[in-house]
Every structure is written in C-alpha cells, then in structure tokens.
C-alpha cells in the first residue's frame, strides 16, 4: 500500500463521496474508485458503503481510517524532520491559544522567538480549547496553549505553565456585587453568557448548578467561539459570564463576583500541549521554553 492510497481513503471519508473527493484531489472518479477498491482488496474488507446521504465508512472502515490518520500524521512528521535536517531551515510554527490564556504570555514568547530566529514564520490561531485540540490531533497545529485537555481528547503531552482560576464576571453596577456571602443559589435566577454545551467550562458550570439542585443556568447568549469582545455584551446588563482575570482587567465597567470556589470551582492548569510522539521541531521546543520562562 502506498502513502497516496491513504490520502485517497481519507479524502473520501472527509468529503463523503467519490465525486467530491476526486474533485478535491484533482483526479478522475474512476481512478479514485479503483484506488479505493485496491485498498479494500488489500485489507480484505469493505471500507465504505453507500447511503442516501452519500458514502460513509463501514464499521471496519471507521477503525481503519483512525489508523490511516495516525499513519498520515506520522509520515508528515517524518518528512518535516528530514526537511529540517537537510535544509536547516527554521520553518513554520503553528500555534493555537485559548481566549482565556493571557495574550501577553503568548505574544511576548512569540516576539522573542521571532527575534531569535529570523527565518522563522508563525501561524497563530485563537479558538476555544476543545477546537484547538481537535486541530492539533488533525495535524493542523504544532502546539496549543490552553487549559489542560481531558484524557478523552486524544494522546497528547501536557507541559504545565501555570495554575489560575477563572471568575464569574458582571457589570460593575450589578446588585450581586453588594451581596455578602455570595452563594451559587443567588445566581440561579440570573441570565448568562456561556459557551456551547460541548465545551468543558460550560459543563463545569452546568454540573455545579445541578449538584445544588438549581436546574441549569438561564442562558441568554450562547457562543461557539471565544473572544474578549464578547464581554462588551455584559455592559449595562445583568448578565453573567465566566472569564479570566486578564479579560476583565482590560475592560472598564466589569468586575468579578466574590463567589467562593466551594460554590463554583473554576481552578485550572494551563500549559502547552502537543501530540505525544509527534515530531516537535527545534522551533516548537524553543517556543515551549520561552512560554515556561514567561509563566514563571
């Protein structure tokens, strides 16, 4: 089996059809069909089946595709390593970081890296942590700076940079700022701005409410992206949201509520994450060192 056969296989799975995959690959449909049939003959099992919505992997195909994705990533890592040895080029470093990670930490490390390595190029992405790990596992990022991923997110290595805690944020005029001994029950009738239910932070908030039999938070705004600009929606309203200290210190008119961590524990570990066993270029290794130095 050739490496291009794996490319063909993954393209069909990604695009959900021979026609769309062939167009993306720049080849004819009969040629792609023949290539998939050749792979199926080698493994001795059907890898795809046709449905009303298109071509989908069989049970065996789904298992094989997971392996094929790993092989493709390993092969690409090997090529990167050989190119670095052959040319000595610094190459491109693709970094993703979470909106709840201090901008100053990541950008100061990047600035130092660019000063040290004139040939280096950076590609930065700012996304919610779960999205970043998905991009990392797909081979689209080399390094992620974000809260520690859960084990279910894949085979990754996590290097801790610092510990901190997020806070419940509200407009500075909010009545809850004047309440002593603030409890989670006091927040039960408030409206919230929160990320979608597939995000760990949202799951933590929902679980805290349910443990105290408070139902779920009253959602006013739900987002599938992260940005400090969202906090502008809180100004002049009674909505609440979760944010890091850097977020509200940079925006006037917003303050953290004095809520005990026993009521809502938002403590976390933040660090640099990369695929276990993947090729980590000297540029990426230096980036991790700079992040460690600056996180102190």
Image (cartoon, rainbow, N blue to C red):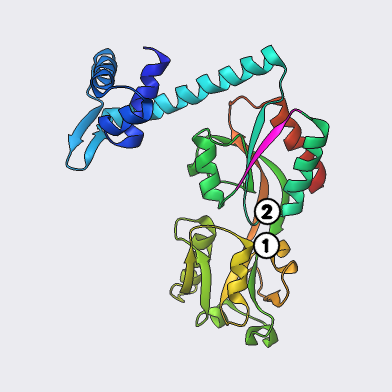
Which residue has dot 2 on it? 101
Q: Residue at x 69, y 81 (%)?
A: 172
The image quadrant that residue 31 belongs to is: top left
Q: Residue at x 60, y 60 (%)?
A: 227
* Residue 109 point in image, percent of width and height: 77, 42
Residue 226, numbered label:
none
* Side of 65 relative to 220 (left or right): left
- Residue 12 seen in this snapshot: no
Which of 216/120 is in front?
120
* Side of 104 relative to 41 (left or right): right
In reply to whether residue 176 is colored magenta, the answer given is: no
Disc 2, SS: loop
Of callouts 1 and 2, the N-terminal one: 2
The span picked out in magenta is 119-125
Which of 28/239 is in front?
28
* Residue 182 point in image, percent of width and height: 64, 81
- Residue 128 seen in this snapshot: yes
Residue 244, numbered label:
1
């Amino acid at each position: 089996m050739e490496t291009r056969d794996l490319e063909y296989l993954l393209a069909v799975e990604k695009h959900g059809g021979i026609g769309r995959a062939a167009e993306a690959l720049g080849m004819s449909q009969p040629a792609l069909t023949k290539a998939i049939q050749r792979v199926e003959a080698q493994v001795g099992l059907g890898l795809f089946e046709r449905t009303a919505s298109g071509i989908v992997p069989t049970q065996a195909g789904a298992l094989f595709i997971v392996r094929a994705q790993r092989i493709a990533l390993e092969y690409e890592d090997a090529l990167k390593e050989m190119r670095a040895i052959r040319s000595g080029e610094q190459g491109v470093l693709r970094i993703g970081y979470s909106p709840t990670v201090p901008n100053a930490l990541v950008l100061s490390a990047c600035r130092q890296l660019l000063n040290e390595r004139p040939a280096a190029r950076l590609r930065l992405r700012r996304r919610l942590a779960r999205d970043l790990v998905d991009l990392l596992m797909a081979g689209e990022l080399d390094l992620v700076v974000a809260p520690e991923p859960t084990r279910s997110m894949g085979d990754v290595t996590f290097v801790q940079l610092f510990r901190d805690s997020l806070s419940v944020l509200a407009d500075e005029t909010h009545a809850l700022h004047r309440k002593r001994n603030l409890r989670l029950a006091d927040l039960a009738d408030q409206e919230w701005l929160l990320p979608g239910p597939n995000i760990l932070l949202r799951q933590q908030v929902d679980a805290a409410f349910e443990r105290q039999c408070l139902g779920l938070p009253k959602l006013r705004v739900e987002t599938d992206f992260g940005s400090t600009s969202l906090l502008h929606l809180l100004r002049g309203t009674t909505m609440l949201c979760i944010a890091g200290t850097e977020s509200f210190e940079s925006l006037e008119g917003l303050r953290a509520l004095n809520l005990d961590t026993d009521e809502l524990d938002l403590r976390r570990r933040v660090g640099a994450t990369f695929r276990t066993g993947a090729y980590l270029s000297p540029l990426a290794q230096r980036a991790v060192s700079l992040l460690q130095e600056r996180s102190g």
